Amino acid sequence: MRKSIKRCLTVALSVLVCSISCVPAMADTKHFVIDSDSNMLPIPETYTVSNVIKNLDGTDLAFKNAEDLFIDKEDNIYVADTGNNRVLKLDYTGKVLLEITEAFGTKLSSPRGVFVDADLNIWIADTKNQRLAVVTKDAKDYIEYKKPSGITDSKGKTFDIEKVVVNDMGYIFALKGAYVMKIDQSNIFQGYMGAKNVDFSFTRFIIRTFGSAKQRKATEALRPTSYNNLTLASDGNLYGVLSEGTSGQIRRLNSVGTNTYPEKGYGYMGYYTDGAILPKEPTFKDITVDKKGIVSVVDQNTGLIYQYDKEGNLLTTFGGLGDKKGTFKSPCSIAVDSKNRLYVLDYSETAACIQVFSETNFITLVHEAINLQLDGEYTKAQNMWEDILKIDSSYFVAHKSIGKIQFKQGKYSDSMASYKMAEDSSGYSEAFSEARHEVFRHYFFWIIVVIVAILVVFIKTFTAIKKRADKWAFDIEMKGDM
Amino acid sequence: MKSLKLAAVTFFHPLVAFRYMKSKRDRKYNYWPILVFLLLMIFTKLFSIFVTHYPLATVDSKNANLFLECAVMIVPIVSWVIASYAMTTILGGEVQFRECLTACSYSLLPYIIINIPLTIATRVMDSGQVGMYNVFNNFALLFVLLLLFINLKEMNNYTIPKTIGIIVLSLATMVLFWAAVSLVFALSMRFVSFVSEIFTEINFRINY
């Protein structure tokens, strides 16, 4: 008796424990891609930690709330070490090559951004000093930009810029709070760069229609979504990540300032497998672009790094929050070097370090296949994608790319199958309409015959049934029964 | 046979058909059409899930929850019948429950008739024709809603404003009904967990 009670209790208890232990399973070190239904699909490992730069050789102070990371064309690492009021130039092993603590006779004060141009001049967003200091590669004074002339509105009272990017034409893009200021080389203000139009909001509409004067005033200060960070790609495009929103958060601006990156949702916004809701939509903190246009962004909320190709297809996701190697406390900046290694800077004081991620064979293959395809080497690219599918048979980008190649070769039905594997319905639809067109051309006469026949049969049956129904309805009206 | 005839009349002359449905109260009632039409509706739903062409499909047939999809069709219909019948009994209606159920089943006819050929036609459509596809789908839906309206009006001899009032009240009843059901469900789940917690407690007392 006692035994059976005990068994009952154990069952009840285990049911209870199971229902309690449904905590969200954070994918901490797993690598995955996301399908069209927001499921996370595991893929082979794509990046491994090859180096951690933590103990700096040549300075006593460790990183303190460092906020920005930059890698120049010679693979030197620049860190805006904000908490220590300095900018460091490091090599791969963590040896300090240069330590900049002052420029133009003034000590740096909380520098939050660093950029290095083609001549290796170092541009420092010296935030608390309200200036943009430029020094040469030997840390000699070069130019100093104070608040530019030509700003008339109240937003430009101060010049506490946080990030800086200089493009090939010499325009300076400085991120200040919610705005990106465009400044020319002679320090004349050229205008603000808005990120996105303000979307229609029903709540705002209601407030503006029925709200009190005070409430209405609160909605007037509405600003378009701002950039969180900017980066300059080697092709001259300016890439940026928006600070909020659920679609089009990654933007690629060409020289006239229009976005050429696909307008869709980036980052994982679905549910974790056990149904727990994510804290909020991803907040991309920084973006980096390699020589071939592969985009990597880092999400501060989840610590995940997302990598996309030129067309916005997700190649891999990895990282996550945690204490282990390969995870982050509070990732705030990401950069890529010429060997496609990813450098991620952690802002938090306890884990202040740069983690260096090297490509695995799998992601190297993927990148090579993408490059071959961009160069128009379709057969080679297709073979490579097929090799990738031998490693991971459900890798979406591979299926999609093969579908695209088959489409270009005119193999529409194969292309349809590949697109279906890639869960790409627009690609499938395109291939299908071409295939349908071919069938139409071949059997045009018979198809017309069949269509006409179906129409005739349909109309005949319809009228026949209608005639009968009219009669039955008449019978009901007259005789009360059919 | 008679049911088939009546279905045809419902499609072309709904007013006549619905009036006829409650005119023969003296003979043995035929329940078969209710079952057949509801099953046909479920069949149509499943058919459209599995056969609709991939670019136009809203539900992925491979990992669709078929039970849920069917419930989404059946539950609103059944709760509508219950709610509208309840309202008509209070507010001077003339219809019996089984007649109400029969009429609503017959009202699903356009959905079945339009959706099955449409689903077959999607096999030659791509995503460019999604507009056309939606037009037909919405037409079927409107047709069904119109038939539901007509059957409520005709079978109870209501005026149009009164019918609209009844519809609003019925919808409110549906909401209340489901609120009550979910409340009972939540409370009973609480009770179950309470009992299981007591068991756990006793288990600890006995064994440790």
Image (cartoon, coloured by chain):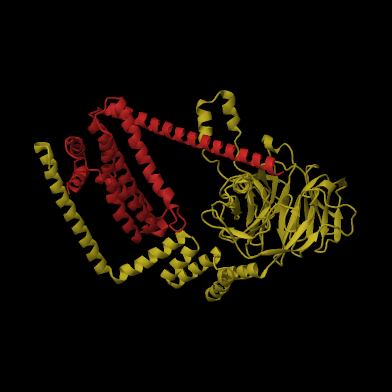
Chain colours: A yellow, B red
Side of A302 relative to B178 (left or right): right
Q: What residue do we see at 51% from left, 32% from top? A: A205
Can residue A150 be seen here? The reply is no
Give the answer, above or below, for where A284 lies relative to B17: below
In percent of width and height, residue B115 lies at 31, 51
In this orientation, which residue lies closer to the viewer: A31 or B79? Answer: B79
Side of B51 relative to A139 (left or right): left
In this orientation, which residue lies closer to the viewer: B57 or A315? Answer: B57
The number of callouts visible is: 0
Q: Quadrant of the C terminus of chain A?
A: top left
Q: Residue furthest left?
A: A479
In percent of width and height, residue B37 lies at 28, 47
In percent of width and height, residue A317 lies at 63, 58
Side of A86 relative to A189 (left or right): right
Give the answer, above or below, for where A374 lies relative to A281: below
Give the answer, above or below, for where A62 lies relative to A389: above
